[in-house]
Image: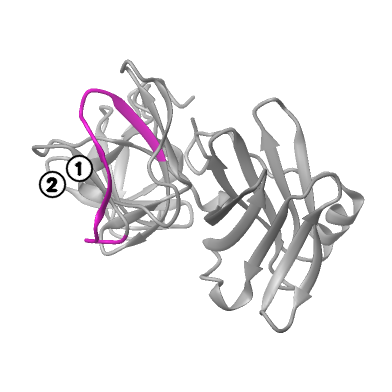
Amino acid sequence: MRLNRLFFGVLCLLSSVTLAVAQEQSSVTCYAYQLPGVNVQLDYDQAQSKPVELFLEYNDGTIDTLHYFSYDEQLARYELRSKSSDSFAMIPRSKRLDLHLLELILRFKGETHTLLLHNVSDAMGVFIHDTQAGDTNLRNRPKGDVVCQLDKKGTYLLSVCAVQDGWWRICGNQISVYETENEGVVAIRKSGDAWIHSSVIAMDTRNYGGQKLHLRDRPSSEGRVLYSFTKEILLRPLEWRGEWVKVQTVDKKHQGWIHSQWLCGNPLTTCA
């Protein structure tokens, strides 16, 4: 698993000439979410501030494509419809959060879901490294109510896509679980948001050949070196700015900025 890629392996699907032309003329951003049995993927035209196409990719390999249909002035929402099924989606324009997150109301197979889709390019892979007593809590907002608790018997991989006051927003609604009796993808909530504190997540460094890495005082290779090391270590992510991540050693003795190419969000394998 590489940093800035979802561990789910979700990809933007570019399936039409129309979309290819749109990409040349404007900035098309891919948003994603994973429901049990289906990957939800949306291409959104940032320049025109409207959706292009929505893809429902099922476990059996079939794909249901919803095309932009209309903008409802009265309800202030964009609408997408499928030509091959009764699938329908709405994006409330007034509730658009930011470039990192997008609200989608999706109806398919007789059920309606309210989803918060994340920007795929903004996802950063991490794993849970919780040395505190008790279960690891996931909350509906920073310092908010607990929406899920994870015991410490397994290894948990997840993606985060925004940070606020030391809390990271978890992308999607599921995480990957390993080394337990229930290995696989586990749902953490049905809808809404989930957050995790930086003090219980970590990344490995990728200096597998003994390279000397540095933590710097600013997100730049010209930044002053605050700490150097040659052994692989665990680092906790504190902030994220472009290709640079502000981190802290697990013993809390050192912190600084490091380039994302030297970080790995999977403790079970190397990120070669």
Q: For mark 2, what is the residue? A: 252
Is residue 208 left or right of 105 when viewed as pictured? left
Query: What type is the residue that disc 2 sits on?
Result: Lys
Tell me which residue sits at (85%, 53%) in the image. 20
Give the amino acid type for the residue marked by disc 1 in the picture. Answer: Thr
Q: Alpha-carbon neighbours of circle 2 within 10 Å: few (<14), some, or many (≥20)?
A: few
The residue lying at 28 percent from left, 57 percent from top is 167
Q: Which residue extends farthest right?
A: 17
The answer, for residue 50, to whether it is visible in the render is no
Left or right side of 210 for 64: right
Residue of label 1:
249
143 magenta-colored: yes
Image location (x, y in percent) of residue 82: 80, 51
| Residue 175 appears left or right of 20 | left
Q: Nearer the viewer, residue 33 or 250?
A: 33
Q: Residue reaching furthest front?
A: 110
Q: State which region is magenta.
A: 141-158
Q: Are marks 2 and 1 in contact (CB under 8 Å)?
A: yes
| Residue beneath the point at 69% across and 58% down | 89
In this orientation, which residue lies closer to the viewer: 266 or 184?
Answer: 184
Above or below, 131 relative to 110: above
Of helix, strand and loop, which one carries label 1?
strand
Asked whether 30 or 208 is in front, the reply is: 30
Q: How many marks?
A: 2
Image location (x, y in percent) of residue 67: 81, 56
Q: Secondary structure at mark 2?
A: loop
